[in-house]
Amino acid sequence: MDQGEIVFMDRVSLRYQEGLSVLKGLSLRLFPRSFHFLTGSSGAGKSSLLRLLYLGLRPTAGTLKIFGTDVQHVSMREASLLRRRVGVVFQDFNLIEHLSVLENVMLPLKVRQESPAARQEQARELLSWVGLEEYVDTLPQRLSGGQRQRVAIARAVVGRPDLLLADEPTGNVDDKMARKLFHLFDGLHKMGTCVVLATHSRHFVDLFPYPELHLENGRLTPHLGKEESPLEIL
Ligand SMILES: Nc1ncnc2c1ncn2[C@@H]1O[C@H](COP(=O)(O)OP(=O)(O)O)[C@@H](O)[C@H]1O
Ligand SMILES: [Mg+2]
């Protein structure tokens, strides 16, 4: 395996209980500083694939390594250390309801050495960038869907993770905000984060020069009309 490989998948399959296989023998390698769109119709398995990548689920078959570590053999503690390097924008946001917007966004910074004041400044800066400066002390339940989504995004990117997984992160915001958020992900990628972004927005997939991983019938296929990434899809 290459030094520094972020994701290594070898014939990974996923099945929920006794159901059909959702993902069938996927082989994939993602490298630092790469950016991939993840596309496919509803139910194609995008969220399931992202769940594997943040260790929310383990493969039913095959080998999955994250940051060089085989996920089948990691302890809870090792898994939690790996997760600290991953930022996730969940499709349903997963905000902590009893914490304020600012506290939610500061969560990933808790493990950092910086002073609380420095952490708060970073979180505030990002919240203001996504247009939520007036809501720092608000509880998530008082926000609209689009506002909650922006909190989830701020929380996922604030720690400049090595791997960012975003599950349809602009599904609830208007086009102008979506454009701004895509530029935020692009900026994070340019600073060194490996980004995997599930989206239905053909417009943004075509706007950015990044390859597309397309899920269909449980398999990854290079999408016609978009630059293929033969090195990544094995
Ligand atoms: N927790 C679950 N238990 C059983 N089946 C599931 C579960 N989550 C998703 N599925 C099924 O897996 C398939 C892929 O779902 P999902 O990964 O959510 O697709 P997408 O994100 O592309 O819409 C769907 O058929 C869905 O019904
Ligand atoms: Mg989904």
Image (tube, rainbow, N blue to C red):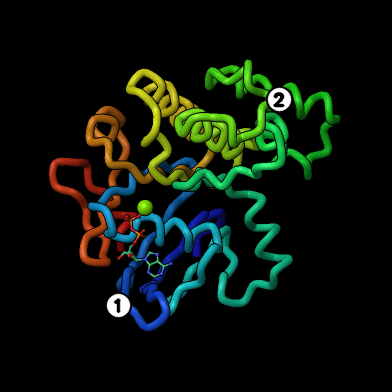
Quadrant position of the C terminus in the picture = bottom left
Q: Determine whether label 2 and label 1 are within 8 Å by CB.
A: no
Looking at the image, the residue that sits furthest to the bottom is 18
- Residue underneath mark 2: 137
- Residue underneath mark 1: 20
Residue 110's disc is none
Mark 2 vs ligand 2: CB under 8 Å? no
Mark 1 vs ligand 1: CB under 8 Å? yes
In the image, residue 21 sits, relative to residue 176, either above or below, namely below
* Circle 2 crowding by C-alpha within 10 Å: few under 14, some 14–19, many from 20: few
Q: Compare residues 37 and 1 and report the one nearer the observer.
A: 37
Residue 165 in view of the camera? no
Q: Residue at x 27, y 59 (%)?
A: 44
In the image, residue 111 sits, relative to residue 232, either above or below, namely above
Labels 2, 1: front one: 2
Q: Tell me the SS state at disc 1.
A: loop
Q: Position of residue 88 (x, y in %)?
A: 54, 46
Q: Tell me the SS state at disc 2.
A: loop
Q: Position of residue 43 (x, y in %)?
A: 28, 59
In the image, residue 58 sits, relative to residue 213, either above or below, namely below
Q: Residue at x 42, y 80 (%)?
A: 17
Q: Position of residue 67 (x, y in %)?
A: 57, 58
Q: Residue at x 38, y 42 (%)?
A: 168
Looking at the image, the residue that sits furthest to the right is 115
Q: Residue at x 39, y 73 (%)?
A: 14
Horizontally, residue 212 falls left or right of residue 92, namely left
